[in-house]
Image: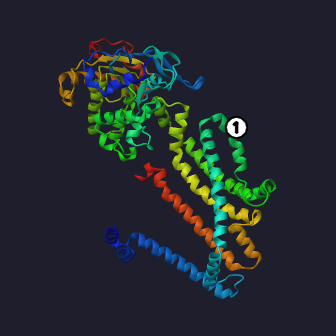
Amino acid sequence: MMNLTGTIGGGGRQGWIAAVVGLAGTTVIWIFASYALFVVTWNIAAGVLDNPVLLPSAGLTLDAAAQLISSGILLSDVLASLKRVVLGFAMAASIAIPLAMLMAFFSTLRRLTMPIVQLLRPIPPIAWIPLAVLWFGIGDPPSYFITAIAAFFPIFLNAFEGGISVEKRHIHAAQFLGAGRRAMIMKIIVPSSMPYIWTGVIVGLGQSWMAVVTAELIAAQSGLGYMIQNSRINLETANVLVGMITIGLLGSLMVAGLRYLERYVLPWKATQ
Amino acid sequence: MTDLSTPTLATPLFPAANADRAAPATGHIRVEQLRVVFGRGANATLAVDDASIEVKPGEFVSIIGPSGCGKSTLLNVVAGFVAPTAGSSTVDGKPTDKPGADRGMVFQQYSLFPWLTVRKNVEFGLRQQGLPLSRREQMARTLLGLAGLLAFENHYPDQLSGGMRQRVGIVRALATSPQVLLMDEPFGALDAQTRQVMQQILTNMWQRFKLSVLFITHDIDESIYLSDRVYVMTARPGRIKAEIPIDLPRPRTPEIAFTPEFLALKQQLRALISAESLLAMGGELKDGGLEGFELSVGEKGVGDLL
């Protein structure tokens, strides 16, 4: 495969790189080039400002990261945030997907509840924090609530869209094959909506990850958001940057993981 | 009421066991004085008017007519998608008020489930009947083998050509052993070559399974080649203009299209339909040459009238 890519890619500008390291290697090289550009720009800016509280250099940030890693602080904060994201996200998905499927199928339920959904949807997760703290106090529970709220709407709205765009001919065909209500939902509407649901899941997980930081800034005493907030108060800006970069890396890794799983969740899409 | 339990299901798997062409007792479609009106008040459209047709058990019957003549509406009444405004539609005496597994339907557009493999598509109806997995698999594979599709059992529909998809569609509709197969221009989207092969496959399947088939088409050759009888429908509102028996011997091969008998039937049907197509295109022609259109045509066909 590497050789093949090298030969057919010969006409392009990346031809000679691809010829040496292959297509996957080329991608990696470009990612590194992109990161290098980022680090260089960052260091230039840090040099110009010349103030590690406003903007520490990449080297100082790396030192801070090494220290946070060796002391185990970073890992425990990552795990705390991860747990909140995964649990809140799972709660949101397990409510949003069945609800969306039922609303797509039963028009009475849809007419009755859709206006409520439309009313709640524009409220940003951060606006729920006061209620979350009042109801659940400080710590994990309010964070679950916030990450769940953040993931709920992208998952629900996409799944619902999938549910109502089920093709009539598939419904009709299923009726002729003797499908009852239950089979119609489980065997036709759900799989037919799966590409939409999956999009919702990917967007929802991203939203959930962003919301956990927001929640932890205010309503928690652990996690990456809390670490960032705490470091800001102590003017440990390098630690703030470590927290931010960790969030960025973990978020994009999670989305990449879901994209990889897609071929197992939507096998009929993978073969095209 | 058709019995859908296992004994009936065994029939298609072992067609050779009852190869004598005794007419099956079930699968009798009867549409009587059907009238279908769409919309209300000023917007009301008379789609089908006083149409009566019959498909006897084991018979292959086509309805042919200009586009928009209401032939699909008629089929949709038998399918149970459209309710009659007046008149009745029954299969074995039971009103066709909703879709059901007693009738098989093959749609004009491919209606395979894209998220299921070819075999799982065929198994779908069997699964609804509660058959165990091993039995479903065995039946689906047997049927796919008959249609020459066994090599594609694990493919997804999007990986197949149009002709193959429609073959799977037919196999899927047959899997639940319906007595009646309803087909709404199933080969309309296929090219001429594929179409001819599909017609042969369909004829084979029909003869093996002894089904009653109601087939909608606007292709004259197709209707003659496939059918025992052809109904010609008028331009909207759709009425039955003529009923032409096709007394060509079976099995038929594509070469039959060059025999004088076939050409005579084709001539007859074309004359009937071109008048209707003109009508369908321009209502202003209505004053001329319509006398006699309400005449019922006997066994000798329209040749007598012209």
Quarter occupied by the C terminus of chain B: top left
Report if residue B140 is visible in the image. Answer: yes
Instruction: State left or right for residue B289 relative to residue A239.
Output: left
Instruction: State left or right for residue B218 relative to residue A119.
Output: left
Q: Position of residue B103 (x, y in %)?
A: 42, 24
Disc tally is 1
B295 vs B82, nearest the viewer: B82
Q: Which residue is mark 1?
A: A112
Q: How is the image coloured?
A: rainbow
Q: Amino acid at mark 1?
A: Leu
Q: Position of residue B156 (x, y in %)?
A: 39, 45
Q: Position of residue B157 (x, y in %)?
A: 39, 43
Bin the neighbour count of mark 1 within 10 Å (Cα to Cα): few under 14, some 14-19, many 20 and up.
few
Q: Is residue B261 above or below residue A113?
A: above
Quarter occupied by the N terminus of chain B: top left
Residue projecting furthest to the right: A134
> The residue tagged with tag 1: helix, strand or loop?
helix
